[in-house]
Image (tube, helix red, strand yellow):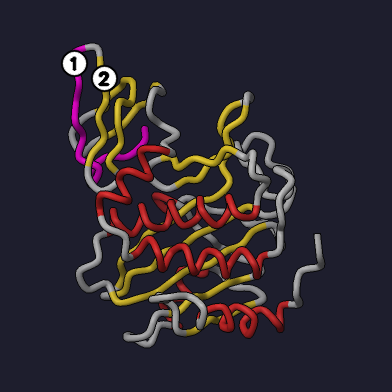
């Protein structure tokens, strides 16, 4: 594996790739040595019109789903957030596009044999005989008329014990974060304009949850059962002791 470019080179190298990206959602790239959160930094950097990507070498206050703290170590991850106008954008669709883009980009960086899957609502996992381990996560926020897609990818080995995580390096892949960011921008731009059918079919073919026993919490109840199907744009089908249930993905979370 070659040496990663210096931080000062990142923005220029990534912006060069934008010109080769059809329909790119990003017009500008901001690279920071450190920030509390790329989500907050992207919101500040967004000019209200042109899409921006903010990348940080280190986050001191990164967050995940439901406000959970997300620790990205020091150079162990690619932490990137995309900010754009929220007009007409569906958070579920943004989450699906982000998950599929992260899966594609990481798959391109990993050995071909690596089995990568999407796990509703916001994870990319690597599957092995030992089970599924989290490789990437997606966070969607709509704030002040701005849609922010945050993606964190574990690139380098670290002490993941007890956290259920794995890195591209541990999988034997290429850990150059500039190359990974370029791939991610291209794949996210592609999935943002994909039609619903393609999103659903691709998700179904790489779904980590179908056939597993799960607990879900809706705004009214707790539901236990086997996941029968996941539509990332709307619903989750669960086989329970009392029959099959269809849960609204907008008001459902993992228990």
Mark 2 secondary-structure assignment: strand
Q: Position of residue 113 (x, y in %)?
A: 64, 39
Question: Distance between the Cα atoms at labels 2 and 1?
Answer: 6 Å
Q: Residue 244: x, y in percent?
A: 20, 21
Q: Position of residue 187 (x, y in %)?
A: 47, 63
Dot 1: within a 10 Å radius of its alpha carbon, few (fewer than 14), some, or many (20 or more) residues? few
Q: Residue at x 57, y 70 (%)?
A: 182
Task: Read off the residue under disc 1.
Answer: 243
**Segment colored magenta:** 242-255
Quadrant housing residue 119 = top left
The residue depicted at 57 percent of the width and 33 percent of the height is: 127
**Residue 212 found in image quarter:** top left
Q: Does the image show residue 71?
A: no
Q: Position of residue 139 (x, y in %)?
A: 42, 57
Residue 252 within the magenta-colored segment of the rendering: yes
Pick whichever, 220 or 135, lies toward us.
Answer: 135
| Pointers 2 and 1 in contact (C-beta within 8 Å) | yes
Query: Callout 2 environment at 10 Å: few (<14), some (14 to 19), or many (20+)?
Result: some
* Of residues 8 and 27, the one drawn nearer to the viewer in this rendering: 27
Name the residue at 56% across, 42% down. Answer: 134
Residue 233 shows in this picture: yes
As displayed, is residue 28 above or below residue 225?
below
Tell me, for residue 53, which label it has, or none.
Answer: none
Please give the name of the residue rendered at 36% of the width and 32% of the height, measured from the top-left corner.
Answer: 255
Q: Which mark is residue 239?
A: 2
**Residue 150 placement, left or right of 153:** left
In this rendering, the answer to whether 146 lies above or below 166 is: below
Quarter of the picture holding the N terminus: bottom right
Numbered label tally: 2
In depth, the one of 135 and 108 nearer the eye is: 108
Q: Is residue 7 left or right of residue 125?
A: right
């Amino acid at each position: 594996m070659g040496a990663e470019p210096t931080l000062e080179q990142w923005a220029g190298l990534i912006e060069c790739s934008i010109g080769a990206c059809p329909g790119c959602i990003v017009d500008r790239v901001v690279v920071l040595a450190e920030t509390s959160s790329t989500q907050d930094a992207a919101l500040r950097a967004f000019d209200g019109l042109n899409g921006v990507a903010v990348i940080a070498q280190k986050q001191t206050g990164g967050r995940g789903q439901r406000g959970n703290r997300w620790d990205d170590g020091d150079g162990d991850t690619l932490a990137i957030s995309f900010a754009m106008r929220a007009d007409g954008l569906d958070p579920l669709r943004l989450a699906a596009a982000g998950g599929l883009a992260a899966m594609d980009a990481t798959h391109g960086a990993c050995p071909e044999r690596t089995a990568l899957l999407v796990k509703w609502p916001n994870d990319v996992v690597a599957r092995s005989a030992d089970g599924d381990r989290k490789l990437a996560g997606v966070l969607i926020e709509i704030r002040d008329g701005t849609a922010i897609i945050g993606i964190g990818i574990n690139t380098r080995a670290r002490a993941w014990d007890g956290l259920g995580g794995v890195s591209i390096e541990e999988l034997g892949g290429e850990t150059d974060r500039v190359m990974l960011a370029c791939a991610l921008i291209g794949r996210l731009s592609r999935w943002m304009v994909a039609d619903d059918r393609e999103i659903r079919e691709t998700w179904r073919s790489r779904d980590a949850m179908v056939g597993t026993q799960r607990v879900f919490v809706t705004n009214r109840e707790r539901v236990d059962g086997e996941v029968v199907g996941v539509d990332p744009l709307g619903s989750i089908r669960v086989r329970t002791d009392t029959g099959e249930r269809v849960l609204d993905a907008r008001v459902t979370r993992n228990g």
